[in-house]
Amino acid sequence: MIASWYEILLICGIILLPICYETSHKFRYNFKFFVYYFAVMINSLILIPAMLFRAKDVRNLVWAGSFCRHISTVLGLRWELRGAEILSRDEAYVIVSNHQSSLDILGMFDFWHVMQKCTVIAKKELLYTGPFGVAAWLAGLIYIDRKNPAKAHSVMNDCTDMLKEKRIKLWVFPEGTRRNTNEIHAFKKGAFHVAVSSQLPIMPVVYSSYSTFLDDKAKILNNGHVIVTTLEPIETKGLTTEDIPALMERVRNVMIETFKATSKEIEVKYGVNGNGLATTLNSGGKGRFRYLDELIKPKLGGGGAGGGDAGSPLVSNGSSVKQMVPPLVPDGVHRRKD
């Protein structure tokens, strides 16, 4: 009798899950993030034994990418990488990127095999996030204490010799805190101190806005398309610490220009505005909100009506989008071959 009640509860759960997923955007938001984090934890547990054989080797992150990149498909996210030929160069760089959400990491997983040798500056709190923190440590992530800026700068500067010797890229989110506000916020100096002190070029990488599919305040996470643009590196040879403020401004300005252009391209492609989710939800209720999700969904799926092949160009040749907003990096567009 007890077993039968468990079976009934299980059946009810199976029935209610898709209903809640389709009718409640808050449930769908929390469920997608649960799937994201749970899948990363499971993959971390699987990878830890293998990573032990080459502990602290940044190439372990390529393994992590190959395991975790499929999470994006489950969540309905597509990443279009432009400038893959720049990102794949076998040289040491300090990569600076805008930071909108923890979903940024999913984008990195999608093209980590392009970067090959790249590590990340992360807050030390991540070290204590169970299997993920351990796997990240084994994969060579560099943890810093953001509450102690002097110690954080010291750790970052100490890693420069390793970067040069092994031609490793160092990925930094100079905004610090992730904020999905449809803009690129002021930068902190840490990444630029490392670049100038080591005389390594800065490579800007720009994610287009998430505002057309993600709203953390309203608890909305729909299917989405993100353009990730790798820009030509900016040299730091001959620069000193006195040049850092001007360097920061220069890098941020070129990233803002790219951010606005690629975000506009997405908005035009899918017929939404810069605050598509919030505006749609608030102005028309749940019905209008669902329309935005269905608007993007057919263009992201593989095969079937309105879907197209998964390896086909995400921006069609001759489309009005290309005519209005030409790609910033026309060559070297990378797409997954799943």
Image (cartoon, grey):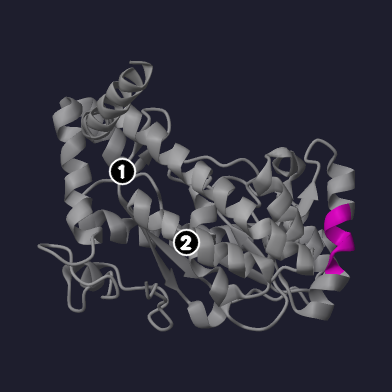
Task: Give the SS element for disc 1.
Answer: loop
In the image, is residue 172 above or below residue 59? above
Which quarter of the image is occupied by the C terminus? bottom left
Give me the residue at 59% from left, 62% from top: 64
Marks 2 and 1: in contact by CB < 8 Å? no
**Residue labelled with disc 2:** 69
Q: Disc 1 vs disc 2: which is toward the camera?
A: 2
State which region is magenta. 155-160
Amino acid carrying label 2: it is Arg
Camera-side residue: 335 or 327?
335
Residue 323 at what x, y percent from top left? 22, 73
Camera-side residue: 27 or 100?
27
Q: Is residue 139 magenta?
A: no
Residue 47 at what x, y percent from top left? 64, 59
Give me the residue at 22% from left, 44% from top: 293
In the image, is residue 241 above or below residue 209? below
Q: Which mark is residue 222?
A: 1
10 Å crowding of disc 1: few (<14), some (14-19), many (20+): many
Give me the residue at 51% from left, 58% from top: 68
